[in-house]
Image (cartoon, helix red, strand yellow):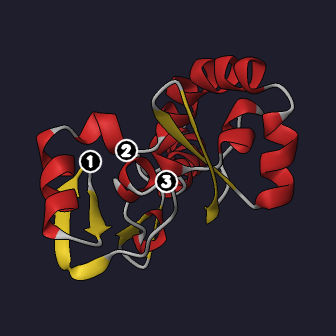
Amino acid sequence: MYKFILFPFALLMMSLNAYAVDPVYSSWGKAIKGYDTVAYFTEGKPVKGNKKYTADWNDATWYFSSQANADLFKGNPEKYAPQYGGYCAWAVSLGSTAKIDPKAWNIVDGKLYLNYNQDIQNKWSINKPKNIAAADKNWPEILKK
């Protein structure tokens, strides 16, 4: 009798773990689609990273456009890493996650936020403080899923 009850429960638990959220958004093994997270701060624009300059941090590989940027990141990854693991800030503010377009970005109070696309970024930007507060509240729970 218990076998019939426990087996479906075990399957459910395995399927939930299969969909756990990674701490960093990555595609094809590249954090934030291979863009240089430091360049947003140093150059004020998105810059594609180079496979010659990488760092492993928070279970992801980060790409940089120069060794100098890789070194800056390695010295203080929390300063340069995007908020919410690089997932869309708007989606996180709504209690979910979504992929990002590295060209839809904002730096607010020294922190990098990425969004799904420019249209979503425009919606997110209407009330940045409210959306950031909601995302800050939601992010720890999202990571537990």
Is 24 located above or below residue 54 in the figure? above
Coordinates of residue 45 in the picture (x, y in percent): 52, 60
User: Which numbered disc, 3 or 2, marks the residue closer to the eye?
Assistant: 3
Is residue 20 visible in this depiction of the protein? no
How far apart in space, not on screen, are marks 3 and 2 (Cα)?
Answer: 15 Å
Q: Amino acid at mark 1?
A: Asn
Give the mark, 3 or 2, whose residue is nearer the N terminus: 3
Q: Residues within 10 Å of mark 1 (few under 14, many from 20)?
A: some
Residue contact between numbered discs 1 and 3, judged by CB atoms under 8 Å:
no
Q: Which residue is mark 1?
A: 58
Q: Which residue is mark 2?
A: 81
Q: Which residue is mark 3?
A: 44
Is residue 120 visible in this depiction of the protein? yes
Residue 127 left/right relative to 116: right
User: Which numbered disc, 1 or 3, marks the residue closer to the eye?
Assistant: 3
Q: How many marks?
A: 3
Coordinates of residue 89 in the picture (x, y in percent): 65, 41
Give the mark, 1 or 2, whose residue is nearer the N terminus: 1
Tag 3 secondary structure? loop
